[in-house]
Each structure stands twice: as structure tokens, then as C-alpha cells.
Image (cartoon, rainbow, N blue to C red):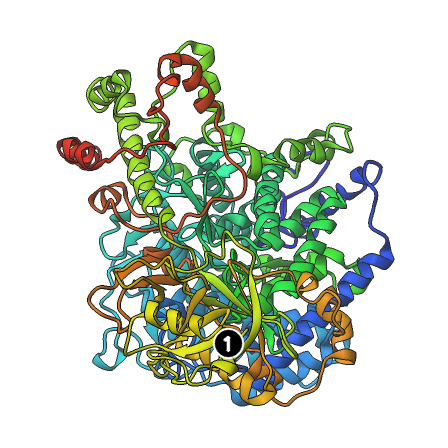
Amino acid sequence: MSEAGGGRGCGSSVPQRAPWSLVAATAAFCLVSATSVWTAGAAPMSREERQKLGNQVLEMFDHAYGNYMEHAYPADELMPLTCRGRVRGQEPSRGDVDDALGKFSLTLIDSLDTLVVLNKTKEFEDAVRKVLRDVNLDNDVVVSVFETNIRVLGGLLGGHSLAIMLKEKGEYMQWYNDELLQMAKQLGYKLLPAFNTTSGLPYPRINLKFGIRKPEARTGTETDTCTACAGTLILEFAALSRFTGATIFEEYARKALDFLWEKRQRSSNLVGVTINIHTGDWVRKDSGVGAGIDSYYEYLLKAYVLLGDDSFLERFNTHYDAIMRYISQPPLLLDVHIHKPMLNARTWMDALLAFFPGLQVLKGDIRPAIETHEMLYQVIKKHNFLPEAFTTDFRVHWAQHPLRPEFAESTYFLYKATGDPYYLEVGKTLIENLNKYARVPCGFAAMKDVRTGSHEDRMDSFFLAEMFKYLYLLFADKEDIIFDIEDYIFTTEAHLLPLWLSTTNQSISKKNTTSEYTELDDSNFDWTCPNTQILFPNDPLYAQSIREPLKNVVDKSCPRGIIRVEESFRSGAKPPLRARDFMATNPEHLEILKKMGAASSIDAEDGLRFMQEMIELSSQQQKEQQLPPRAVQIVSHPFFGRVVLTAGPAQFGLDLSKHKETRGFVASSKPYNGCSELTNPEAVMGKIALIQRGQCMFAEKARNIQNAGAIGGIVIDDNEGSSSDTAPLFQMAGDGKDTDDIKIPMLFLFSKEGRIILDAIREYEEVEVLLSDKAKDRAAILKGKMIPSYIINSNPEMENEEQPSSENDSQSAEQITSSSQEVDLVDQGSPEESSLNSQPESLSPADTDNAASVSPSEQISNPMENHETTSLDGECTDLDNQLQEQSETEEDSNPNVSWGKKVQPIDSILADWNEDIEAFEMMEKDEL
């Protein structure tokens, strides 16, 4: 999501029906005009430093793009750990994530306009020639309509937009004759069959060669799609119509948007996450601004900017009012139920909502944008990256981070709106973290787990399409860009579409149908860019004053419910009972439980919320008793700590979370299975022994290598080709006997990860590793050693000068990790295995079944559903906790009162509530 500039005039009102050409001409002035407000109140970053950071972004892009072209092209994406291309069907399936891949050189197409923004015009011209020569859009492959639209169609249109701009300038692309536009038109027609539904909402997937429903198409049986999937088409489809004069594309996209607007929940003006494409019924009735809905809201506002249709602005403002009324709980943005918007649908947030502060900037609502952005930044400072999901008290919920650009996008727009150099420092932090933690010899690798620092063999195309674009623009001056960026609007994939399309081929009726559905609040419709003197009331430290209370929000406070608790306290009412405070021995608490669902609608909502919290708390407490993953970090030449493998822990031996890490060289044991006394004790003495899984218990292996003098052990899976990419990681359990005699740390690696260490031994002989609870800082690991300085300083500019040369460096520096864990008691994958938490794939608007929250009824019916929830440092105390303690002095003297001291079983409590749960579900159906 984002936009180079939007809105109307800045200091004074623009007439409500101003000519759109005038609007387009001043579209971005509002954002940049505020810059001067801040220079007096904050120390600006020097031009030299901004240029240095901009050059660093260029080098990072070259590293990512160059490795893709060298090692992956014409494949869709680069696998940066194994240094090869990801080809659909040749790699283990990752589920819906792979629906973005269509064997059409995705990363190259997605990167086209990035090349021009970064002033790489010669590379752009070469890339366009490669696309025209090599890319085939007629492949027998099922792809996501949403992903293909925003990445491929958007990429082709963005490339075409800048190609004609360059041609007009007279130096580059003189041979170009709309070839990219013709490819875009071909692709547009291939996507049109997806709209063959009674509602006009598209099917979520389509076969590029065979379309929909044909037996050979292998698709067309789906009934549901996400709101963002159906509502994020208008920019690309309308641009295609305006460029070509073929109105059918814009007509189909408008029809889908009209249907979604008509189906919104009328009392709350919210939309759900998932909708039936045939009936229009909401399948998932929770609503937020993250996965599954995000870009629907974005495209309503941007459709107004690009197309000049007032109805899109009116719809956006109506939705935005509902969002700020129900979903926004500053600095949090929490999903709610569309028919009961005062009731939260979940207690965690996903990373995709990081785009929303940027959208709020375009709307002109700066204060909540600053608040939410600052909260997200505090989470990033804790983990180096934004976890894929985190709870309202800032615990990690899903630990992956696929190098998403949404936070960088919002950072760019906040800097454009405020001119506050603070946001330049934020951008600098993002650059440093990417180089320090995600950079690998063959590109940039996604984070499999932000807690351990381990990597995933994945570099999505959006990383090149968006991340480098926003970071470069953040530090660039106007003269650093070869065209006027303010003449373009950004799509959700950051592709550039020219604003002059607003006056081109306007054959679509602009009838305003919005007011037919709802009475609108006039206060929502300020059709001017906010006056900077109103936004920033003569105070150059305005943004800082908003950020300051949030500086320690992650470590020291929990904002959830603070406002509501304060209001309750002022009114004399007691705050609602929270699951974390519940004590089964407290008669007052038991009395409150009896009232829930019976006394009033408010009590009913409190009851449902309490049950949801109790279920999540129970699940969380179960997981807290389990062991988190560990890290194996290769610290010897040429890896120097840059290779981090996520390893399964053991329930016996040295606990790496409580003791100092174990560091040593590795050696293979003989026999390799470690099931008998070792015949090479001199080889493993004082080293970390490598053992193969199988033929005996894990604990027996540990005793044998310990008796031989090993200081640690790594068990490598005996199932050839097994990988943490496709299988759950193992947590090794004991043998049913007393294992206190085992004093050394033991970790487990799958075959693919173990092969990295074995290959390194063959190539470099001496391989040193670090066994720890999480990856350690390179400077600490390599202190006192003679190594290339760019490794410690994460300075990529020095890499070409100092990096050791080796043909196999990029392959040997592979970094593998896991997304889930599994307990294995017997070393054979036996029936005695018990599963640990598994983390879902990364969020995608097209994959909302895994990415967004389950409905309340689903949560209740599956109380043991696992969601990874790991506490951040620091305890969290809500105001409602403090108020509860003040009003319950009687319980303070009871040693069994604290939930943290004594865990109460909830099975009996939940059993008593079965009838209440059914009543809630029936009430929900009746209301609808």
C-alpha cells in the first residue's frame, strides 16, 4: 500500500467539484509542504549522511537483484540460502504462498519500475528486453488472481508507465512501442474469466492457460475469497482500461467494489475478512485493517485519487469513521466482530497492518498514524524485525518475518508529511537490521524466527518491488530522481501509475451510488488536505510529544483497555473481570461468572470476551511449559556467524536458556548413530559431536558422546532430504529414566540443515559452531579474531573488497530454520511423539484462513488451538490490574490468589459454559 501523493489543496478549501486535472496537479503538495514545519524543532540529518544511506540502499538492491539475475532468473524467485531459483513444482509445496508463482519471472517483472526509481535506466532497458523475450503468460499453472494482479499486471503497467516517460525524455527506450502494455492487456484478458460469478466477485484462483472450471483448469470450485482479494483490483484494471481504451477491465473491477460496499454490515459500516463469491454471505465476520482486508480500504482512497470518482472517497470516509470508532484503540488496531463491533475478535495483531499509518497520512489523520507507527517501531527495536503477529501485550504470536515492506512504507509517508528527521533515523535502523541480520552471500533471506535470528530460504519479489523503493525515496532529494515522483500514485505493490490517467478515456459512468445505501456524517468529508497549522499547532515538537509516551510501551506498559478502564473508574463502575485475574477461590469472581450472559448485553459481551481470553491463556500456559527452539550458529571461516540454523531442543541435558552458550569445533562420532561406546573418543574429546538419528534413544546417544568427552551433541535426522521447510522440528525427550546424569547440551537438526555442517566440514575441515538459545551478535562472537571488518560492522560497501573468495561460499553459507516443533520421545519418529506449537505460513491477503483470526465459535470449539506466544522482556501491568488489586485487598493476603503463582484448571469451567457458548452462537445468528 502507498501513494506518492494524494488529496486536494493544502491551505484552503478546494471546491467540492474542482476539475480533476487541478486536483491531480496538486495531489502531493500537502505531504511535502509540511516538511519545513519540523526543521526548527529537530536536528536534521546532513545531506552527506542521507546520500550515504541512499547509496547503501542502492548497493543492497544490487546485491539482491544481481543474485536473482545470476542465480535464479528466469525462475520466479530467488532462494537465497541455497542460491538457486524457486520454480513452481520443483520445490516442496508451501501451500497458498506458492499461488503467487506462475513461471513468469515474477521478481523481474515486480522490479521493473524499482530500477527506474533507483536511477538504473540502463538496467531497466535490459530488463524490459528480457521480459519481452523470455516471459510466457500462457502457462498451465493455477495462480492467485490477487497476487497476479498486484505483482504481474501492476509490474507490467508500472514498467510501461516509466518506459513511455523515459522515451519522451529522448535518451532511453527509443525503440519501445507499448510492448509491456500489450503483455498487460493479454494478462488482463486471462484474468477476466475469474469474474464469471453471479456477484461479480472474482474467483480467488485461475489457470493462466485454461481459465476457470474446465477439467484441465484444476480450479473454479472455490466458494470463498477474502475482501482484499476482491477489492484490490480497481487501480490496475482501471489503469489498463485507461491506457488501452478497453473499458471492460475497469467495469469488472468497479462491479466487485460495488458489491463489497453493498454487503458491508450496515449498522457498523465494517466488512468481514472472507465472503462467499456466489451468495455474498460473510464467511468470516471479524473485521480489521490487517490481513484479508487491508488493501481494500487502501484502494478506495486511491481510486478516488487516480480516477476522480467522489463515491470512492465517500465510501472510504464511511469505512474510516467505523475503523476509528471500533478498531482503533490507540496505539493498537484490533479486529472486532462486524455485527458486535464493541467486542474484540482477537487479542493479537498481524504485521500487514503496518501499512495503515501511511494510509492515515494520506487521509490527513496524523496523530493516530504517529502513535501506531511508534508502537510498531518499539516492537521492531525489541526483535530487529516486526514479527508476523504479536499480541496486545506485545508477545510474539507468529515469529516469522518475510522482509515485509509495510513499515518502511509508513515511515516514508510520515517523513513526507512531517519532515521530522526522526523518521530518517528509523529508516537508518531498518537498513542496518537488514544488512546485519537478513543479508546472506546470495541475497537477503527472510527471517524464520525473529527470536532466534534464524533464516528461511526465501526472498519474495515484493522485497525488491517495495522495500528498496521506499527506503531510497526516504533519503533521496528531488534531484536524485530522474522524474517527478509526485506525478504518480503507488499501487499496493508500490508500482507507479501516472495521475494523468484521471482524464484519459473516461468512459465509465461516475454515478454516485454511495448515498443510496447510507446517510453520511458530513463531518467525515473534509475534502481538502489538512492545513499544517492545524495538524501541527505551531509546535515543531508535536510528533515527538505524541511518540514520547510510547517509548517504553513494549517493555513497561500494556495500553490495552486503558481508556475503557479509566472511564469505568471515573464512573464508579468496576472494570470487567479479565481471565488473567480470575481466581476460582474468589467468591466474587464466581458470582461475576454467573452473571455473564444473563444480566445484560454488556455482561454477555464481557462473558464472551472472558471465555476467549481464558482459552488463549490456557493455550499460552501450556506452551510456556514447552521448550522454545534453539540456534546453531556457524562461527568459523567463511561464515563468521552469518549462518544460523534453528535447532530442536532436548528435554534433558544443559538448558541453553539458563546457561552460557556452548562453543566448539564439530566432529562426527563413530559409530555415527552413537548407540554404543564411541570408537573415536580422541576425535570428539572437547568437541561437539555429530550423531545420526535412529536405532536407539536420544538420551543413550547423549550419554555415549558425553562419556567420550564431548562438550555437546547435534543429532542429524536420518531421513534423507528432510527439511524444516516442510516438516515440524523435533524436541528430543528422555528415555523414561532419570536423565540428570546428562550434563551436555543436545540439539536436533533435520537432514537438510545438518548437511550444511557436513558439507562445511568436507570443504573447510575445521568447523566451529555456537550452540545457544538464540543467535548471538557477530561482534561478540568474533571479538579478538582477525576477520573482515564488514562482517562485524555490517558494512556491505566493504564486502566486495574484503570478502573471502570461494566458489561455494554462497552455497556453504546456507541458513536454514524451522517454523514449528515436535516432541519425539523415541528416536524413530514413534507413536510416542507429541506435537509442539506450529506456526502458520506468512500472512497473505489471499490466504486468510491461515493469516487472520478464527471466529469466536471456532476459538471456543477448539480451546487447545496453538498460537506461538512468547513474552517480550519486561512484565506488563494494565491499569485494570492495578484497580483490581486495590479493590480486592482480601485476596492479597491469600498465597493462592495470584494467577501467576497457581494455575487453575479451566476444563470444568469451560464445561459449565457449554450452554452459554451455544446461546452466544444462536444470538449471533439471530442478529444477522
Q: Is residue 538 left or right of residue 810?
A: right
Q: Nearer the viewer, residue 788 or 82?
A: 788
Q: Is residue 747 above or below residue 899?
A: below
Q: Is residue 107 left or right of residue 6?
A: left
What's the amino acid at mark 1?
A: Leu
Query: Which image quarter is the C terminus in?
Result: top left
Using a 10 Å C-alpha cutoff, classify the residue at mark 1 as few (fewer than 14 neighbours), some (14 to 19) or many (20 or more). many
Location of residue 248 by image quarter: bottom left
What residue sits 61% from the left and 41% below the top?
A: 374
- Residue 198 in the image, given as x and y percentages of width and height: 25, 59
Q: Residue furthest top?
A: 572
Asked if residue 673 is positioned above or below residue 416 in the image, the reply reads below
Q: Is residue 5 left or right of residue 279?
A: right
**Quarter-of-image position of residue 579:** top left
| Placement of 275 over or under 59, stated as above or below | above
Residue at the disc numbered 1: 106
Residue 68 drawn at (x, y percent): 58, 80
Q: State the residue in front, 371 or 435.
A: 435
Task: Give the image location of residue 861, x and y in percent.
Answer: 20, 44
